[in-house]
Image (spheres, helix red, strand yellow):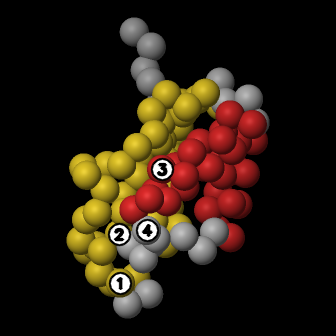
Amino acid sequence: MRHYEAMYIIDPDVPEEQWEAAIARYSKIITDHGGIVSDAGLWDRGRRTLAYSINKKTEGIYVLMQFQSDADAPKELERIFRISDDVMRHIIVRQDYKEE
């Protein structure tokens, strides 16, 4: 299994009570595909000002998730991010750990 990191920005209009539910929903996609989520939560208290406006919004809720999985889980997560109304932007990167 490979190590991945996903960062996504939740729409600031989503109520604060639903942030944890969204994090759990996206983490469940990884675990349903046999992956392991090592860490998932708000990044730097969550709400941050965006560098540029997205859909006329200047703030977003930043979430950082680190996980291990095969190549199928990040593809499915990417697909779900694209069709989700509550995610404004996302990125998934594979982390390469150099063996010493």
Q: Amino acid at mark 2?
A: Gly
Expressed as whole percent of the image width and height from the top left, the position of residue 62 reads 36, 58
| SS for callout 3 | helix
Expressed as whole percent of the image width and height from the top left, the position of residue 48 reads 25, 65
- Which label lies toward us, 4 or 2? 4
- The residue labelled by disc 4 is 15
Quarter occupied by residue 70: top right
Contact between marks 2 and 3 (CB within 8 A): the answer is no
Q: Which mark is residue 60?
A: 2
Q: Amino acid at mark 1?
A: Lys
Q: Residue at x 36, y 49 (%)?
A: 42
| SS for callout 2 | strand
Q: Amino acid at mark 3?
A: Glu
Q: Which of 9/19 is in front?
A: 19
Quarter occupied by residue 84: bottom right
Say whether residue 70 is visible: no
| SS for callout 4 | loop
How far apart are the alpha carbons under marks 3 and 1? 21 Å
Contact between marks 3 and 4 (CB within 8 A): the answer is no
Q: Residue at x 66, y 41 (%)?
A: 28
How far apart are the alpha carbons under marks 4 and 2? 12 Å
Q: Residue at x 45, y 13 (%)?
A: 99
- The residue labelled by disc 1 is 57
Q: Which of 78/40 is in front?
A: 40
Contact between marks 1 and 2 (CB within 8 A): the answer is yes
- In terms of sequence position, does the residue under pointer 1 or pointer 4 come before the other? 4
